[in-house]
Every structure is written in structure tokens, then in C-alpha cells.
């Protein structure tokens, strides 16, 4: 990047941080990529949009915006119109989908609807271009969102995977990637960015509804812990990152354990049963994943592991007209 670009009037330390993030990981969003940015109108997505617009020429990106109107408040349609006008002035193409608010009555349903519509728009962009390109769906998740997700998942009794750090990059489906570049920022950072750059914000009134669990965590629980233990959110994020690394390590160890237990005759039952229940479940899960497209949930795999341990011989029917059978020595799959 030239010195002229580095010293341009609107270039801030926030631009530099994000630009550096992309330079340090060139596979995150490659040069010349097509981006579809999810913009709600709130401070996180508006900060993301403006930072991306300002640095896009450095990476030769083609930028599009998608907005999802949940119709949860009376001003939502006006917000969508104003957002479109804002993007038009920036010469950014704008897509909008409106939900049937009765069909997205919960946080989970609304999230599923957003990702469904985002994927559909991404498919539209794919069909308009060469088949060998990728589309990058960009969202404004910050490390504050990660701390909130950690607490919510912990309260729900999530497993280790649910307590891991939000993934920065994930393949959603063929040629469509989900990217979260703002995980290097906090919500306080995006607030500062919007104030510093005079970025308009369209705040959804539902964000202040404390009946919504995430809002309660955001507005009440985390601030309370931050008052009691300053730096609490940073430590939560640090722990979640360690959990991510731990899960990666466990996956790799599980693969090695599976290879040790498996030969051309099947999974060695005696060797499997010599391991702890957690290891047995991991190995059986890998074994089933390699042979079934529809997976069993954790509870079913746990029950299967206990059955194989307790009974010298048996069989259990599985989805897709398969059954798992075992005897004293080996465990295998057969068609029902």
C-alpha cells in the first residue's frame, strides 16, 4: 500500500487495524473478492460497512449490502428506505428482504431467517458470475458478541464446542463463506468509530427489550460483572479462545485414537472399551460420521457407547437404513 493511501484524510487507526488484519491473513478475504455485507443499521454493522468501503480499493473488492427487515417495529420500513439511500450515495448495491414477523417470533427463528436470506442472496450473486468464484458474507460480530454468546451457551449447558470463540471464517456451503472481521474490535470500539467518523445509526428499538435474553446479558449482566471485575469481557474472550484451541486439539487426538482402534475388520471393541466414556463417544462419532450422512446427537452416541460396553453382542438400528452391530471383538455397520 502506498504512503499516500496510508495518510489519506479519512484513514484512522481503526482502518489500519482492519487493513492489517486482512494483510496478515490473505486467505480471510482474498484480493478481488465479492462481498455481501449484512447491515442492520446498528453501530457494529455501520462501522463495518464504512471501514470496508474505505479500504475496499486496497483489496479490489466488490461490495454489496444486504439488510433484513424483521418488521418488529413501526419504523423498520423507513429504516430500510433510508439505509438504501445511504448505500446509493456510496455507490453500493443494496438488497433488502422483509420477514413475516409472525414466523420469526424468537431470536433463534430470526437468526435462522437472516442466514437463510443471506445465503439466497449469495446464491443470486453466484449465478450472475462465473461458477468458480466465492462469495463472502460479512457480519459485524465483535468480541463483545463473543462474550455474550459464551455466557448464554454456558447458561444453556452447552458442551465445549459451544464455549469456544466465534469462528472468524466458516464455509457455509459451496463457494459461500461467512466472515467476521470485527472480532478484533469491541462494541465500545465500534461506538467510537461511528462517533469519530460521523456515521449515522439506525438503532432497532427491540435491542432495548430486556425480555430478549441477549439484550439482558448485554445491558445488565455483563456490565454488572465488569463493575465487579474490570476486564471481565476480555478474560471471557481469552478463555473462549483457549477452548477453541482445546477443541481443535481434542479433534486431532480423537482422529489418532480412531485410527488406533480401527483396522480392516472394523472397530476393535476390547480396545474401545478400555477407554473412558468420553473417548469412546468421540471414536464412535468419528466412525459414524465416515459412514452416515445423518448424525446421531450426543445423547444417542452416549447410550450407544454404554450398550457396546455392557453387552458382548448386539445391534442398534440407525438412520438411512443402517444398523451398527457388534460382537466380542469388532464393531461394524451393515444395511438394515
Image (tube, rainbow, N blue to C red):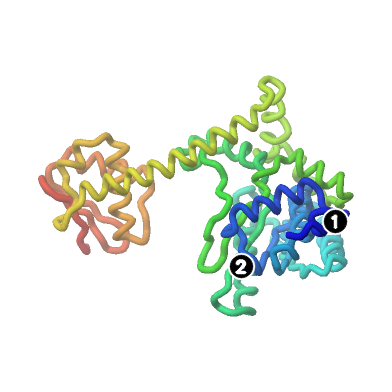
Q: Is residue 191 above or below residue 32?
A: above
Q: Secondary structure at mark 2?
A: strand
* Residue occupying image coordinates x 64% and y 32%: 234
Number of labels in the image equals 2
Q: Position of residue 293 (x, y in %)?
A: 36, 61
How far apart are the alpha carbons under marks 1 and 2?
29 Å
Q: Is residue 41 above or below residue 238?
A: below
**Residue 110 visible here:** no
Q: Position of residue 314 (x, y in %)?
A: 16, 48
Number of residues whose C-alpha sits closer than 10 Å to that of mark 2, classed few (under 14), some (14–19) or many (20 or more) = many
Q: Residue furthest left?
A: 328
* Residue occupying image coordinates x 22% and y 47%: 260
Q: Position of residue 200 (x, y in %)?
A: 87, 52
Q: Position of residue 224 (x, y in %)?
A: 70, 25
Q: Secondary structure at mark 1?
A: loop
User: Label for residue 308?
Assistant: none
Q: The C terminus is located in which quarter? A: bottom left
**Residue 59 visible here:** yes
Does residue 1 appear left or right of residue 287 in this picture? right
> Which callout, 1 or 2, points to the residue nearer the camera?
1
* Residue for badge 1: 8
Residue in the foreground of this view, choosing between 152 and 318: 152
Q: Residue furthest top?
A: 228
* Residue for badge 2: 135
Residue in the foreground of this view, choosing between 251 and 272: 251
Query: Is there CB contact under 8 Å for labels 1 and 2?
Result: no
* Residue occupying image coordinates x 73% and y 63%: 58
Q: Please report whichever mark, 1 or 2, sits nearer to the chain's N-terminal start.
A: 1
Does residue 172 appear left or right of residue 51 in this picture? left
Number of residues whose C-alpha sits closer than 10 Å to that of mark 1, classed few (under 14), some (14–19) or many (20 or more) = few
* Residue occupying image coordinates x 74% and y 58%: 52
Amino acid at each position: 500500500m502506498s504512503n499516500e493511501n496510508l495518510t489519506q484524510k479519512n484513514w484512522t487507526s481503526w482502518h489500519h487495524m482492519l487493513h492489517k488484519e486482512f494483510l496478515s491473513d490473505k486467505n480471510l478475504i482474498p484480493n478481488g473478492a465479492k462481498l455481501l455485507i449484512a447491515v442492520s443499521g446498528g453501530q457494529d454493522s455501520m462501522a463495518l460497512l464504512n471501514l470496508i468501503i474505505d479500504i475496499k480499493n486496497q483489496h479490489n473488492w466488490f461490495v454489496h449490502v444486504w439488510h433484513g427487515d424483521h418488521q418488529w417495529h413501526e419504523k423498520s420500513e423507513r429504516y430500510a428506505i433510508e439505509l438504501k439511500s445511504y448505500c446509493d450515495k456510496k455507490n453500493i448495491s443494496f438488497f433488502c428482504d422483509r420477514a413475516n414477523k409472525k414466523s420469526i417470533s424468537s431470536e433463534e427463528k430470526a437468526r435462522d431467517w437472516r442466514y437463510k436470506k443471506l445465503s439466497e442472496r449469495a446464491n443470486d450473486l453466484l449465478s450472475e458470475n462465473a461458477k468458480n468464484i466465492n462469495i463472502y458474507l460479512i457480519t459485524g460480530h465483535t468480541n463483545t458478541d463473543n462474550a455474550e454468546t459464551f455466557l448464554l451457551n454456558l447458561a444453556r449447558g452447552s458442551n465445549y464446542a459451544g464455549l469456544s470463540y466465534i469462528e472468524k471464517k466458516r464455509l457455509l456451503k459451496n463457494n459461500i463463506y461467512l466472515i467476521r472481521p470485527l472480532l478484533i474490535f469491541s462494541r465500545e470500539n465500534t461506538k467510537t468509530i461511528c462517533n469519530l467518523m460521523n456515521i449515522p445509526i439506525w438503532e432497532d428499538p427491540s435491542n432495548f427489550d430486556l425480555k430478549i435474553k441477549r439484550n439482558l446479558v448485554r445491558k445488565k449482566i455483563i456490565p454488572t460483572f465488569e463493575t465487579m471485575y474490570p476486564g471481565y469481557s476480555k478474560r471471557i474472550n481469552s478463555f473462549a479462545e483457549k477452548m477453541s484451541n482445546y477443541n481443535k486439539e481434542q479433534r486431532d487426538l480423537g482422529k489418532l485414537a480412531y485410527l488406533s482402534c480401527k483396522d480392516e475388520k472394523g472397530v476393535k471393541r476390547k480396545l474401545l472399551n478400555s477407554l473412558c466414556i468420553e473417548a469412546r463417544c468421540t471414536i464412535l462419532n468419528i466412525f459414524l460420521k465416515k459412514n452416515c450422512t445423518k448424525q446421531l446427537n450426543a445423547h444417542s452416541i452416549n447410550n450407544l457407547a454404554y450398550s457396546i460396553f455392557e453387552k458382548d453382542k448386539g445391534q442398534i438400528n440407525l438412520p438411512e437404513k443402517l444398523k451398527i452391530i457388534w460382537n466380542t471383538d469388532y464393531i461394524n455397520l451393515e444395511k438394515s
